[in-house]
Amino acid sequence: MASERLTDWSVKFLSMDESVSEDIMCATHRALCEHGYAALTMQDIADESSKSKASLHYHYDTKRDLLLAFLDNLGERMTERLAAVDGETPTDEFLALLEELLSPSTERYPEFHTALLEIKAQAPYVDGFRERIADIDALVHERLRAVVAAGVEAGEFRADLDPEETATFVLTLLNGVRTRHVAVGGSPDDVEGTLLRYVEDQVVAAEAEAPVE
Amino acid sequence: MASERLTDWSVKFLSMDESVSEDIMCATHRALCEHGYAALTMQDIADESSKSKASLHYHYDTKRDLLLAFLDNLGERMTERLAAVDGETPTDEFLALLEELLSPSTERYPEFHTALLEIKAQAPYVDGFRERIADIDALVHERLRAVVAAGVEAGEFRADLDPEETATFVLTLLNGVRTRHVAVGGSPDDVEGTLLRYVEDQVVAAEAEAPVE
């Protein structure tokens, strides 16, 4: 009985090859940009994909299930974005990371982040949303923490810097940039100068070279 | 004809005395905490108030109209909160302002800020939401800017500080605190230490007294 269920499960999920999953994820991204989260229907997603609504429902029982898979996929894409960031020194890497995280991640940046903010606002209500958003938050936090720790270790960053708290501070600021962008039309440029001065004066050790002019 | 309409309008709005308006605003606050924004109905608000649903509709044609009045009321309450903040010096006042803005503003802080984040996420879609949210954002921004400018003027804050950019930086961080609180359960305490060190090292002039131990 258990092995029968396992077979069913395997057939169902192994039958969805990566290109199908990718097609559905891209369609979900486009549909979220077009309709937002609250108004989104499985039909909207089907309309953006090469699949029928019935086929979507074959892979994902509900809109919530599909959105959970989408958030997992978003986490994978964030992992790839973070892995692509590099630098000769911890200071270079930290600055490259800030630039990457401040820059628009998608072509339809405002629409997508509006939908993402709707999803964040639903985090306390929809089972599984908060865990996935927290996973993505933790990915970024860990990368920021690691590079700050490496900078302290290398003597490039202030010795009294707490990598954990510094990562939280920067991550909180980035969350604020996204929220103000959606809510009042703020731009990442509004904080970039102050953030760079913060890094220069608060993160990088006084005896190290200043990262910006 | 025009004067007739004006009379109708005056009677309708002058007839709503302040206590009625206050009752409806408090009921809206409670209903938002209870149900969130997306699921909120006029009946939910009536259930929290001493008024009937018909009476609510007499004052506000739609849920959107009521929410716009609620956001205006929120702005008035923010004005009062900001006016109550004081300090002997610009440094004291700036620190008191940060403490006030970081602290929970309502008894039902998490629920209310979840609803407010939903409303922010609807800002691009619902006519009038963005303007009201931007008004509240501008109130806080102006107060932060003014106290930073006063600190620079008094020689307490760094002479090279841009009051406008500093206010935006702090306001963006505060937005991030709210968003992370709702989305991943973060706390204002997570950034308080780093924010105070930022103020100590980046805002207050080196020759002035340090604001924190």
Image (cartoon, coloured by chain):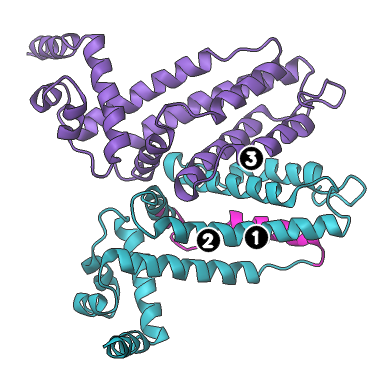
Chain colours: A purple, B cyan
Up the image or down, A55 lies above or below B25; here it is: above
**Residue type, label 2:** Ile
Q: Do the residues bearing badges 1 and 2 touch, measured as CB atoms within 8 Å?
A: no
Label 3 Cα neighbours within 10 Å, binned few <14 / some 14-19 / many ≥20: many
Query: Of residues B148 and A172, which is closer to you in this image?
Result: B148
Which residue is the extreme one toward the front?
B1
Q: Which residue is mark 1?
A: B142
Q: Chain of mark 2?
A: B
Secondary structure beneath label 2: helix
**Residue type, label 3:** Val
Q: Do the residues bearing badges 3 and 1 touch, measured as CB atoms within 8 Å?
A: no
Q: Chain of mark 3?
A: A
Can I make out residue A127 in this image? Answer: no
- Which residue occupies 69% across, 17% down? A92
Question: Are the residues under badges 1 and 2 in a single subunit?
Answer: yes
Q: Which residue is mark 3?
A: A191
Please state the extent of the stretch shown in magenta in the rendering.
Answer: B88-112
Task: Residue A90 in the image: state x and y as whole percent.
Answer: 69, 16
Question: Are the residues under badges 3 and 1 in a single subunit?
Answer: no
Label 2 Cα neighbours within 10 Å, binned few <14 / some 14-19 / many ≥20: many
Q: CA distance from mark 1 to mark 2?
A: 10 Å
Query: Of residues B186 and A19, which is closer to you in this image?
Result: A19
- Which residue occupies 18% across, 13% down? A13
Res A161 → quadrant:
top right
**Residue type, label 1:** Glu
Label 1 Cα neighbours within 10 Å, binned few <14 / some 14-19 / many ≥20: some
Task: Residue A39 in the image: state x and y as whole percent.
Answer: 23, 44
- Which residue occupies 30% across, 86% down? B2
Q: Which residue is mark 2?
A: B136
Q: Is residue B203 left or right of residue A67?
A: right
